[in-house]
Image (cartoon, rainbow, N blue to C red):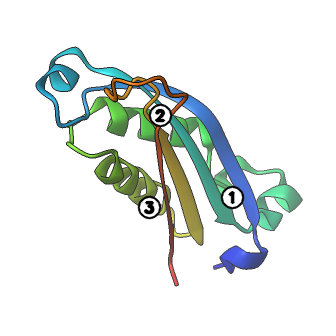
Amino acid sequence: MADASNSDRISVIGLRAFGRHGVLPEERANGQEFVIDAALWLDLRPAAAADDLSLTVSYAELAQQLTAIVSGEPVDLIETLADRLVTACLADERVAAAEVTVHKPSAPIGLPFADVTVTVRRSRT
Protein backbone atom coordinates (compact mmCIF):
# COMPACT_ATOMS: atom_id res chain seq x y z
CA MET A 1 0.00 0.00 0.00
CA ALA A 2 1.24 3.48 -0.86
CA ASP A 3 2.06 6.09 1.73
CA ALA A 4 -0.46 8.94 1.45
CA SER A 5 2.30 11.54 1.63
CA ASN A 6 3.86 10.50 -1.68
CA SER A 7 1.06 8.83 -3.62
CA ASP A 8 -1.22 9.97 -6.38
CA ARG A 9 -4.73 11.33 -6.03
CA ILE A 10 -8.15 10.79 -7.57
CA SER A 11 -10.71 13.52 -6.86
CA VAL A 12 -14.41 13.90 -7.44
CA ILE A 13 -15.38 17.55 -6.95
CA GLY A 14 -18.83 19.09 -6.76
CA LEU A 15 -20.85 15.87 -6.66
CA ARG A 16 -24.48 16.86 -6.01
CA ALA A 17 -26.95 14.68 -4.16
CA PHE A 18 -30.27 15.19 -2.40
CA GLY A 19 -30.48 14.19 1.26
CA ARG A 20 -32.55 14.70 4.39
CA HIS A 21 -29.80 15.39 6.90
CA GLY A 22 -30.07 17.89 9.73
CA VAL A 23 -31.38 18.38 13.23
CA LEU A 24 -34.46 20.41 12.31
CA PRO A 25 -37.72 18.65 11.42
CA GLU A 26 -38.08 20.66 8.20
CA GLU A 27 -34.65 19.50 7.04
CA ARG A 28 -35.78 15.89 7.40
CA ALA A 29 -39.19 16.55 5.82
CA ASN A 30 -38.09 18.72 2.89
CA GLY A 31 -34.50 17.65 2.35
CA GLN A 32 -31.93 19.68 0.45
CA GLU A 33 -29.02 19.39 -1.93
CA PHE A 34 -25.59 18.53 -0.57
CA VAL A 35 -22.35 18.91 -2.50
CA ILE A 36 -19.50 16.46 -1.95
CA ASP A 37 -15.80 16.78 -2.70
CA ALA A 38 -13.78 13.59 -2.26
CA ALA A 39 -10.06 12.95 -2.72
CA LEU A 40 -8.43 9.53 -2.52
CA TRP A 41 -4.68 9.00 -2.24
CA LEU A 42 -3.33 5.82 -3.79
CA ASP A 43 -0.57 4.58 -6.06
CA LEU A 44 -1.80 4.97 -9.63
CA ARG A 45 1.36 3.60 -11.28
CA PRO A 46 0.04 0.02 -11.78
CA ALA A 47 -3.16 1.26 -13.46
CA ALA A 48 -1.26 3.76 -15.61
CA ALA A 49 1.35 1.22 -16.70
CA ALA A 50 -1.25 -1.39 -17.67
CA ASP A 51 -3.90 1.11 -18.81
CA ASP A 52 -6.32 -1.03 -16.79
CA LEU A 53 -9.34 0.31 -14.90
CA SER A 54 -9.40 -2.72 -12.61
CA LEU A 55 -6.09 -1.57 -11.11
CA THR A 56 -7.49 1.72 -9.83
CA VAL A 57 -10.59 3.16 -8.17
CA SER A 58 -13.38 3.89 -10.63
CA TYR A 59 -14.46 7.47 -10.00
CA ALA A 60 -17.85 6.65 -11.57
CA GLU A 61 -18.44 3.84 -9.07
CA LEU A 62 -17.16 6.04 -6.24
CA ALA A 63 -19.61 8.81 -7.21
CA GLN A 64 -22.48 6.30 -7.20
CA GLN A 65 -21.49 5.02 -3.73
CA LEU A 66 -21.20 8.52 -2.27
CA THR A 67 -24.52 9.61 -3.79
CA ALA A 68 -26.24 6.55 -2.33
CA ILE A 69 -24.94 7.43 1.13
CA VAL A 70 -26.09 11.06 0.89
CA SER A 71 -29.50 9.96 -0.41
CA GLY A 72 -29.76 7.19 2.17
CA GLU A 73 -30.35 7.08 5.91
CA PRO A 74 -30.61 10.61 7.39
CA VAL A 75 -28.27 11.77 10.15
CA ASP A 76 -28.39 14.84 12.36
CA LEU A 77 -24.87 16.12 11.69
CA ILE A 78 -22.94 16.62 8.47
CA GLU A 79 -19.95 15.53 10.54
CA THR A 80 -21.57 12.08 10.72
CA LEU A 81 -22.33 12.16 7.01
CA ALA A 82 -18.74 13.12 6.19
CA ASP A 83 -17.46 10.26 8.35
CA ARG A 84 -19.68 7.75 6.53
CA LEU A 85 -18.51 9.06 3.17
CA VAL A 86 -14.80 8.91 4.02
CA THR A 87 -15.27 5.38 5.38
CA ALA A 88 -16.72 4.38 2.01
CA CYS A 89 -13.72 5.95 0.27
CA LEU A 90 -11.37 3.83 2.37
CA ALA A 91 -13.25 0.59 1.62
CA ASP A 92 -10.84 -0.14 -1.22
CA GLU A 93 -7.62 -1.31 0.43
CA ARG A 94 -5.50 0.37 -2.24
CA VAL A 95 -6.59 3.75 -0.87
CA ALA A 96 -4.01 4.98 1.65
CA ALA A 97 -5.96 8.07 2.70
CA ALA A 98 -9.13 9.93 1.83
CA GLU A 99 -10.53 13.39 2.42
CA VAL A 100 -14.19 14.33 2.08
CA THR A 101 -15.80 17.76 2.28
CA VAL A 102 -19.55 17.97 2.71
CA HIS A 103 -21.06 21.27 1.59
CA LYS A 104 -24.47 22.27 2.93
CA PRO A 105 -25.20 25.43 0.94
CA SER A 106 -28.82 25.68 2.14
CA ALA A 107 -28.10 25.24 5.85
CA PRO A 108 -30.77 26.91 8.00
CA ILE A 109 -28.59 29.67 9.45
CA GLY A 110 -30.96 32.60 9.01
CA LEU A 111 -28.19 34.92 7.83
CA PRO A 112 -26.57 35.50 4.43
CA PHE A 113 -23.70 33.05 3.81
CA ALA A 114 -21.97 31.36 0.90
CA ASP A 115 -21.54 27.82 2.21
CA VAL A 116 -21.18 25.60 5.26
CA THR A 117 -18.67 22.75 5.05
CA VAL A 118 -17.23 19.96 7.13
CA THR A 119 -14.04 18.27 6.00
CA VAL A 120 -12.67 15.00 7.35
CA ARG A 121 -9.46 13.23 6.41
CA ARG A 122 -8.67 9.67 7.38
CA SER A 123 -5.75 7.40 6.62
CA ARG A 124 -4.90 3.79 7.20
CA THR A 125 -1.84 4.64 9.29
The circle on residue 67 is: none
Q: Classify mark 1: helix, strand or loop.
A: helix
Instruction: Choose the circle earlier in sequence order: 1 or 3.
Output: 1
Q: Residue at x 83, y 51 (%)?
A: 51
- 110 on left or right of 34: left
Determine the image quadrant of residue 59: top right
Labelled disc at residue 64: 2
Whether residue 95 appears in this view of the structure is: no
Above or below, 10 relative to 49: above
Residue ID for mark 1: 55
| Residue plotted at (57% across, 48% down) | 38
Residue 91: mark:
3
The local crowd at label 1, few if under 14, some if 14 to 19, many if 20 or more residues have their Cα within 10 Å, is: some
In the depicted structure, whether residue 112 falls above or below residue 87: above
The residue at 47%/34% (across/down) is: 64
Q: Nearer the viewer, residue 56 or 25?
A: 25
**Callout 1–callout 3 Cβ contact below 8 Å:** no
Secondary structure under the numbered disc 3 in the rendered image: loop
Amino acid carrying mark 1 in the image: Leu
Whether residue 3 sits left or right of residue 49 in the image: it is left
